[in-house]
Amino acid sequence: MFFFLDSEIRQLAYNLFPGGNKPIGVLVELFSITYEIRKGMEKRSREFGLSYGQYIALCVLSAQRDEMSSPSALAEKMGVSRAAISSMVISLEQDGYINKYDDPNDKRGVFISLNDKGRGKINQMDPFFIGLASRLLSDFSESEICQFETYLSRVRSAFEVVKGSRLTDSREGEEKWCED
């Protein structure tokens, strides 16, 4: 809805709501900063030879029992489509970061597992991403970080409540569906 990135466009978004709308302003800022962080993480991941999504896929695999998963389970855990995982798996396998095995119980099914090269790539990239998180939150106290985490959790919970429900656009007076 509001992927407004530069300050001029963000200001336009604020002006769309006469008298100001603090929640909209907060969401615009949240979307903007998360977009910028994601864009920076994607750029840095590319410098390591992976997309950010591929790095996350390797991290999710590393957290699995036996570092193994089906592509569909991996897609679900990452919140992406099976098509996106399919192309990621092909690329990660071609680059030698994962191994792919046929499922002995399902002739059409496969499992993927993290291998030593994949673990090595995670170990190479983790310090950057851990350092980035530390730098972004370095001006916050431990208490403030806990509060921030609580606020984000509350936003996520509120979104889960409204996701898929009918919402009314007060400017148009018509109902709209909140989509995923």
Image: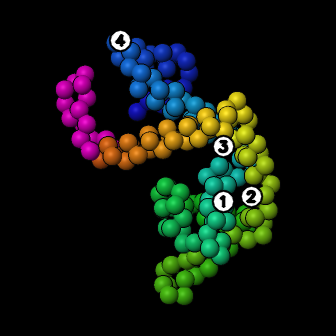
For image coordinates 62% across by 37% down, the residue present is: 143
Residue 169 lies within the magenta run = yes
Q: Which residue is mark 3?
A: 42
For image coordinates 56% across by 21% down, the residue present is: 6
Which kind of residue does numbered mark 2 sit on?
Answer: Ile
**How far apart are the alpha carbons under marks 3 and 1?**
15 Å
Residue 54 appears in view = no
For image coordinates 70% across by 52% down, the residue present is: 50
Which kind of residue does numbered mark 1 sit on?
Answer: Cys
- Name the secondary structure under disc 3: helix
State which tag comes first along the sequence, 3 or 4: 4
Q: Is residue 123 left or right of residue 176?
A: right
Q: Which residue is mark 2?
A: 122
Q: Position of residue 153 (x, y in %)?
A: 48, 44
State which tag comes first along the sequence, 1 or 2: 1
- Name the secondary structure under disc 1: helix
If the image is split into quadrants, where does the N terminus sit? top left
Residue lying farthest to the bottom in this orientation: 104
| Mark 1 touches mark 2? (CB < 8 Å) | yes
**How far apart are the alpha carbons under marks 1 and 4?**
45 Å
Q: Which residue is mark 1?
A: 59
Residue 146 appears in view = yes
**How far apart are the alpha carbons under marks 1 and 2?**
7 Å
The residues colored magenta run: 165-180
How packed is label 3: few (under 14 Cα within 10 Å), some, or many (20 or more)?
Answer: some
Q: Is residue 39 left or right of residue 45?
A: left
